């Protein structure tokens, strides 16, 4: 797994939260958010499609796992009652790319945590992990899906 350290700028995002195991809450959240994205026409060439993973499924009860489906929005974006808007602070991340079905994302996350992180000398930050979905799952074969993984890192 190739990992690099990257500092992301502050991101303003809008989206929705769904509770439940990530394999269920992720697809459900995007199914709810996608029509809103189309209706509001909030996308541009620079829009990021992000999943924020708040909890460790090994210790959090399945019904309490929080997943946020989010899209980046400009500063002048006016929210409605359907979405939550938040700011993700600028910070450093360990970044890796997962290629393949979303169902196999847990293996890439495990490799990042249990192989790369101990050897890196870095410490994770207590902030949500992020996934950036780089291609359209409706138009891309599962084995060609690309997901950028962002593991937040504590400052040195």
Image: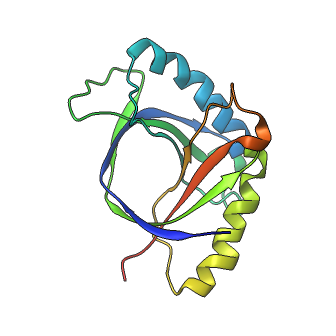
In the rendered image, residue 88, in percent from the top left (x then y), is placed at: 35, 51
Tell me which residue sits at (39%, 17%) in the image. 41
Colour mapping: rainbow
Please state which of residues 154 and 57 is positioned toward the viewer in this rendering: 154
Tag count: 0
Extreme residue toward the left, this view: 76
Residue 36 appears left or right of 8: right
- Is residue 76 visible in the rendered image? The answer is yes
Residue at far top of view: 39
Residue 51 lies, with reference to residue 33, above or below; the image says below
Q: Is residue 128 above or below residue 51?
A: below
Determine if residue 21 is in view. Answer: no
| The image quarter in which residue 30 lies | top right
Q: Quadrant of the C terminus?
A: bottom left
- At horizontal 57% and vertical 46% (from top left) the residue drawn is 66
- Residue drawn where x is 63% and y is 77% of the image: 116
Say above or below: 8 vs 102: below
| Residue 32 image position (x, y, % from top left) | 57, 22
x and y percentages locating residue 79 in the rendered image: 30, 25
Q: Position of residue 63 (x, y in %)?
A: 68, 44
Q: Is residue 90 left or right of residue 24?
A: left
The quadrant in which the N terminus is found is bottom right
């Amino acid at each position: 797994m190739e990992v690099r350290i990257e500092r992301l700028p502050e991101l303003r995002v809008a989206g929705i939260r769904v509770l439940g195991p990530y394999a269920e809450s992720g697809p459900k959240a995007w199914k709810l958010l996608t029509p809103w994205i189309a209706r509001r026409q909030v996308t541009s060439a620079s829009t990021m499609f992000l999943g924020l993973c708040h909890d460790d499924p090994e210790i959090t009860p399945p019904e309490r796992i929080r997943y946020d489906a989010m899209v980046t929005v400009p500063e002048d974006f006016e929210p409605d009652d359907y979405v939550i808007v938040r700011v993700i602070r600028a910070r450093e991340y360990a970044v890796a790319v997962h290629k393949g079905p979303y169902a196999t994302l847990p293996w890439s996350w495990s490799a990042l945590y249990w192989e790369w992180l101990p050897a890196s000398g870095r410490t994770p930050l207590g902030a949500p992990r992020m996934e950036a979905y780089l291609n359209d799952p409706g138009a891309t074969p599962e084995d060609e899906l690309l997901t950028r993984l962002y593991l937040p890192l504590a400052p040195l």
